[in-house]
Image (cartoon, rainbow, N blue to C red):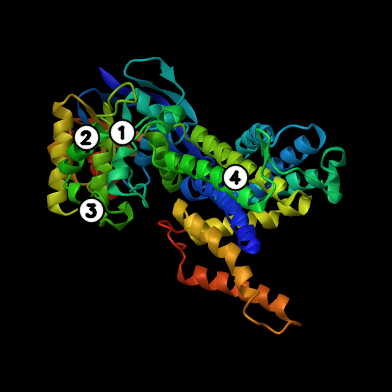
Amino acid sequence: MDAIRTKELHKHFSGVAAIDGLSVAFEQGKVTGVVGPNGSGKTTLVNVLSGMLPPTAGVMVIGGEREMKGLRASDTAYHGITRTFQEVRLFEQMTVLDNILVVLTERSVWGSLFERHNAGHMKKVETVLTRVGLWEKRSQLAHNLSYGQRKLLEIARVLAMTHSDHIGQDASIFLFDEPFAGLFPEMIKVIVSVIKELKEAGKTVILIEHNMNLIRELCDHLIVMDSGKLLAEGKPDHVLAKREVIEAYLGE
Amino acid sequence: MPYLIHIAILFFIYAILGVGLNLIVGYAGLLSVTHAAFYGIGAYATAVALAHYGLGFFASVILGIVITAIVSLLAGMVLSKFKDDYYALASFGFNVIAFSIFLNWESVTKGPLGIPGIDRPSLFGFTFSANETFLALAVVLFGAVYALAHFIANSSFGRVLKAIREDEKALEVFGYKVAYFKLAIFVIGAAMASIAGSLFASYITYIDPSSFSLNESIFILAIVIMGGLGSLRGTLAGALFLILLPEILRFVGLPTDIAAQMRQIIYGAILVLLMLYRPKGFIGEYEVK
């Protein structure tokens, strides 16, 4: 079954098509890689799927539900979607701890007024922060973390979305927008193992990535975009051997 | 001594104003410059209710809160269309509108003449007419407001406000309808200002529109920034400092013919220097970007 499918999706920015009639499917429980040259529309696709940008035209279908003309960002979590950002977006002047707690607590205005975080919340925070090696840093401001630690905190934040009691459902679709960019090998290892665990748990992962070795290691399926269109898709090894893909990437 | 009590009462009134505004600006990151409008609504509600309708002070406080809540809800809904500096500018516009209503709605507010002869509060036959007892009342109301602000700041709601301040777009992706949170805190902060207004009206026993101008909003914002955005204790320090500084400058022995102007200049210079060397305010954790 498809976790998310788009049909004839378009996203135009003042007349320029960033996504141009894209129809793709992301299979449930699989890791699907999205590659393509800079400006091919990968991040725009993630932004549309996570409700941060409204599509200009076309529809998306989540988990076989009815067709939708885009989603509001605040609704995506209720469809099981969560994401990281290419340019890390943390709650900078809050502690590492609060960055995680905020995705674990009450979503309603009234409920949150009368809620304080408790041992149960802390247990979950410890689990996800330990997973990425940031539990020791919990009292620091996110702002003061190193570049790599910031990327890991974003990973911990989406992991916390699998433990949220207030969303009605755990996150099941993970959009990772270049999670490995600029990281040291040890940090890459951590994120690789997180993605493998998510897959084993039956979660759907959509991974934007430039490193072809990581793509081969992690992805079950690969989508190649160029100028907002689908250029090729299929098994990673097969797709990456295609002539038009090599040309699009190397510009030959 | 009466002078010190007067200063103390002013301090608690401005501390209430500052605490409410800090929830809006320091926690939620909404750069509101219209707090004096809600302060004024509270003051006029008390003045009119006491002078014309014979309502008690405490009933007038409730009336002020209700009117302020409605007005701030509507204002907040319009302001939610804006961000950052545009938010500041639009909120500034609200203060100008409120001020001109106070000034021109003469049948209710008596316009520039103001409303004199406002009674001091009374409760079960006891009247807070002496400044000492009024101070006690101010302390109690301040304590209630501070306790509420503290409760909010330490709840999950308070954490959500900070996350809104940091990156509301990113927060939405995690399932928050941020507009409701922003409206809620705007209304709560405004209602606190209304309480301060009621206190002010019945303390001074005379109000006119000049107390609720844009300048006053900027002064309250200065208290919040000076004390430290996102720090309630900081706001107390800010209020203490900005209330005391002009008073202290009275006693520095400047030549009488230039004293008033010099005080203004020294006052302004100290504010500029403080912001240069302590951009986070006295106890702030967060710096305006």
Q: Are marks 2 and 1 on the same chain?
A: yes
**In this orientation, which residue lies closer to the viewer: A50 or A18?**
A50
Tell me if I can see residue B103 in this picture.
Answer: yes
Mark 3: few, some, or many residues within 10 Å (few <14, many ≥20)?
some
Marks 3 and 1 close (CB-CB < 8 Å): no
Tell me if I can see residue B169 in this picture.
Answer: no
Q: Quadrant of residue B50?
A: top right
User: Which amino acid lies under the numbered mark 1 shown in the image of this protein?
Assistant: Leu
**In this orientation, which residue lies closer to the viewer: B43 or A29?**
B43
Report which residue position mark 4 lands on: B137
Q: In whole angstroms, how far apart are the C-alphas of marks 2 and 3?
A: 22 Å
Report which residue position mark 1 lands on: A104
Q: Position of residue A117 (x, y in %)?
A: 31, 36
User: Which amino acid lies under the numbered mark 2 shown in the image of this protein?
Assistant: Lys
Report which residue position mark 3 lands on: A148
Q: Position of residue A101 (x, y in %)?
A: 30, 38
Q: Nearer the viewer, mark 3 or mark 4?
A: 4
User: Which amino acid lies under the numbered mark 4 shown in the image of this protein?
Assistant: Leu
Mark 1: few, some, or many residues within 10 Å (few <14, many ≥20)?
many
Q: Is residue A51 above or below residue A152?
A: above
Q: Chain of mark 2?
A: A
User: Which amino acid lies under the numbered mark 3 shown in the image of this protein?
Assistant: Gly
Q: In whole angstroms, how far apart are the C-alphas of marks 3 and 1?
A: 23 Å
- What kind of element bears circle 3? helix
- What kind of element bears circle 4? helix
Report which residue position mark 2 lands on: A124
Marks 2 and 3 close (CB-CB < 8 Å): no
Q: Are marks 4 and 2 on the same chain?
A: no
- What kind of element bears circle 2? helix
